[in-house]
Structures are given as C-alpha cells and as structure tokens.
C-alpha cells in the first residue's frame, strides 16, 4: 500500500485500486456463496479434504472462466461507465488472475474450517511478502508502470495457485468424482448466503465507483488510502471470525451465542483501541507513510474509523445466524438493506462532499448495520446488545493473558 502510493501517486493509486476492485467484483460473481458454504460444511465434518480440494479446483476453473468470458464481453461498457481511466491491458490482465485468486481463497477457507489456522496464516503472510516484493521490484528497482505491476501480480497469483494445487494433490489426494447430493447441499447453502456476500461487497466498494464517476482516479486514490488504513482493522475481525466460525457452527446455541458475544466485545476492545490510536496519529501517519500528496485522506480516514468498528462487530454477530442457526438468508437480507441504503447515501453525499461524503455515508450505514444485527441477535439468543459491545473486566484479563502467553512463546523461540 505504501510503496504503490508513493511511486504511483493519487491517480495511479486510483487505477490500481480500481484494478483490485475489478478482481474483487469478478471474484464475487465467481464465488456464488461457495466460500461460506465450504466453511459451513467442512466445519460440520460433511466434507473431507480431498473432496473439498476437488470442489475448490473445479469451482475456481469453471466459475472463474465463465466470469472472465462475460467480463470480456462487457469490457467496452464497463471501462467506460465503471472503470473509467483503466487501460485495456490492465483490465484484461487483472481478470486473468481470477481463477487463481478464487482457488486460493477456497483453499484458505478449507484450512481455517478444519482449524488449521497456522497453515492458513503462514500462507497468507507469504503471499503478502510476495506482493510486496513484486511492488518493490517493479516500481522501485526496474521503474515499471502500473501495467507491469498488474502483470507481475497476476503471474504471482496464478503461480501460487498452481503450486498449492499440485502440492495438495500429492499430500492429501483428490476426489475426482464428488457426490451429486453433496454438491446440491453445498449449492443450496451457498446460494442462500450469496446475497449477503454480494451485498457486503457492494456495501464496501460502491463508494469507489461513485467517486470515480464523479471526481476521477485521483479522488479514488486519495480515498483508497483512507479505506486501506481503516480496513487494516478488519484483519482482526476476519481472523476472529475464521477462528470462531467452526465452533459457532458445531456448538449448542447457548454456547455459540456466548462465543459470538465475547468475540464482539473483544473486537470493540482491541479494534477500538487501535482505531483511537490511528485517529490521533492520522495526520502524521498519512504524511509519513504516503507523502504530502495524500494529506486529503486524513479527514476521510477519521470519519471511517468508528463505522469500521461497527461493521466488524456486526459481521461477527451475523455469524450466529449464518453458522449456528444455519440461516444465511437472514444475514443476506440485513446486508442487502445496508447496501441499498449505502448507495442512496453515496449518491447524495459524494457529489457534494467528495471523499469525506463517501466516508460519512459508509460510517452511517455501518452503524445502522450493527444496530439491526444486535436487534436480531437479541431476539434469537436473548443476549443484551450491551453484552456484545461493552467489554468487561474478564475480557481485559483474557487479553492480558493472551499477550503474556504470546510473549512467553516468543521468548522460548528466541
């Protein structure tokens, strides 16, 4: 994020963000809810690793290929209306990474559903290091442009996916023929959850499309810095969500509800503390990391932070309905309503207030999403919203115990 912002500037960073947005939207259409469905069925013990690997590989190839074909047919319209400023090469090369990106996400999902968190985390860390290496090599060493950077990223993603598939087949096997009944169950759950995935992504990314249409690539670049720094907090709830989801799926309702509530409080405690630090240090952080060209990002960043915490807790709470109750459709309806409200607010506030308007609309909708999620949780689990959003003494003690354990582990390794 820092390297690309400094070498590409606001306009180039904006195009790179649109490239990532293109791949994200394409991934969403290729996913059809399989990510959540794999988590659910693997966590319940209904699918072994060879079968899950086959579903992941077939799904990535077939669905990814189909989405690429449609996106290429729609290229003239999409680049004119939604991705203005993006070249043909950036558009096509970005799309080429889709099958690899889909397979990698499916593979990580299966590992976390089987509670192999260290494997998934190590792989994601390595993937991030490779992405950083490509950015430094292309932009700082050889002086390449954004097209060269996108090409390098695509080569890395496809190479990683191929390597993971081959190693996984050798180590754990591959179920060439998957039972039709299992495929139907996977698709049934996935389709029910799919509306939530679509709505969640629309809720998170339509602001950039509106900004690009009204103010152009440079505004998207400014806003993407604020969004990226804010979304660094979401690594916390993503990790927590993946860690607790297998237990939320397999536990009794009361135990699952207690676990979800504890996860929400811990997110408020940890994420909220970090958000306060980022809020206070925002002017210095942005200028030091990204340079003077991105100072306009500070105001948007500060407005986004409270909403980011709200959405983090909301997504953790909705796992109770998706996982334990087996009702992904309820979560989908909540997120769909939020996305529709968000679009209306973006169209209202972005033309008048630019990136601060986009940030304001996002935070308002994120807070509303949390309120609705808490009301639903109270009705189903009979747990007060305060027990989800207000940390208690035990939460602080648990966090301190975890920190001490990590320090002791680090000392032993050292």
Image (spheres, rainbow, N blue to C red):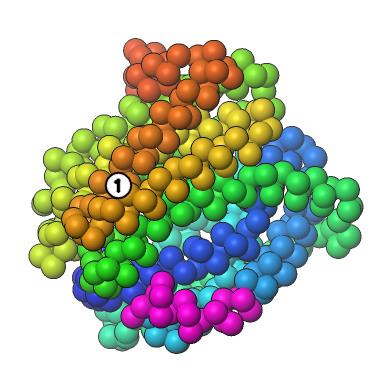
| Above or below, 19 relative to 294 | below
Q: Quadrant of residue 114?
A: top right
Does residue 393 appear in the picture of this structure? Answer: yes
> Looking at the picture, does residue 65 appear above or below residue 368?
below
Q: Is residue 226 left or right of residue 382?
A: left
Q: Which residues are magenta?
A: 68-85
Q: Is residue 311 above or below residue 85?
A: above
Picture layout, residue 375 above or below residue 197:
above
Residue at x 56%, y 40% (from the top left corner)? 333
Identify the residue at image location x=47%, y=23%: 375
- Residue 18 at what x, y percent from top left? 38, 70
Q: Residue 19, image x and y in percent?
A: 42, 72
The crowd level at tag 1 (other Cα within 10 Å; few <14, some 14-19, many 20+) is many
Instruction: Give the structural element (helix, strand or loop) at label 1.
Output: helix
* 378 with respect to 43 (left or right): left
Residue 379 location, x and y as percent? 55, 18
Displayed quadrant of residue 117: top right
Camera-side residue: 91 or 54? 91
Residue at the (35%, 35%) spot, across then down: 367
Quadrant in the picture for the C terminus: top left
Residue 57 in the magenta stretch? The answer is no
Query: Which residue is found at the position 33% from the left and 27% from the top?
Result: 269
Magenta span: chief secondary structure? helix
- Identify the residue under disc 1: 361
């Amino acid at each position: 994020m820092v390297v690309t912002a400094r070498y590409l500037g606001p306009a180039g960073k904006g195009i790179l963000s649109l490239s990532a947005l293109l791949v994200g939207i394409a991934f969403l259409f290729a996913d059809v809810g399989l990510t959540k469905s794999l988590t659910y069925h693997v966590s319940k013990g209904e699918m072994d690793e060879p079968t899950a690997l086959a579903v992941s590989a077939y799904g990535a190839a077939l669905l990814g290929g189909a989405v690429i074909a449609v996106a290429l047919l729609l290229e003239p319209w999409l680049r004119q209306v939604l991705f203005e400023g993006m070249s043909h090469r950036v558009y096509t090369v970005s799309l080429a990474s889709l099958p690899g990106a889909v397979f990698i996400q499916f593979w990580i999902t299966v590992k976390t559903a089987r509670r192999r968190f260290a494997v998934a985390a190590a792989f994601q860390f390595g993937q991030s290091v490779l992405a950083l290496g490509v950015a430094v090599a292309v932009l700082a060493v050889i002086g390449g442009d954004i097209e060269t950077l996108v090409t390098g990223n695509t080569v890395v993603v496809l190479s990683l996916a191929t390597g993971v598939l081959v190693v996984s087949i050798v180590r754990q096997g591959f179920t060439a023929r998957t039972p039709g009944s299992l495929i139907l169950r996977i698709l049934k759950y996935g389709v029910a959850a799919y509306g939530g995935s679509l709505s969640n992504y629309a809720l998170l990314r339509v602001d950039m499309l509106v900004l690009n249409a009204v103010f152009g690539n440079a505004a998207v670049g400014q806003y993407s810095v604020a969004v990226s720094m804010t979304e660094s907090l979401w690594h916390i709830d993503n990790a927590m969500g993946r860690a607790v989801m297998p237990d939320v799926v397999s536990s009794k309702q009361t135990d699952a509800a207690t676990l979800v509530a504890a996860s929400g409080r811990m997110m408020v405690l940890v994420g909220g503390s970090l958000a306060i630090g980022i809020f206070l240090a925002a002017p210095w952080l942005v200028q030091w990391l990204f340079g003077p060209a991105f100072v306009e990002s500070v105001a948007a960043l500060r407005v986004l932070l409270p909403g980011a915490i709200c959405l983090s807790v909301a997504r953790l709470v909705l796992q109770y309905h998706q996982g334990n109750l087996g009702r992904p459709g309820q979560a989908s309806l909540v997120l769909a309503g939020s996305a529709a409200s968000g679009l209306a607010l973006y169209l209202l506030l972005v033309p008048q207030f630019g990136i601060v308007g986009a940030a304001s609309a996002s935070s308002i909708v994120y807070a509303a999403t949390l309120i609705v999620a808490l009301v639903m949780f109270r009705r189903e689990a009979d747990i007060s919203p305060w027990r989800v959003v207000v940390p208690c003494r035990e939460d602080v003690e648990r966090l301190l115990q975890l920190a001490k354990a990590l320090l002791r582990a680090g000392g032993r390794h050292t």
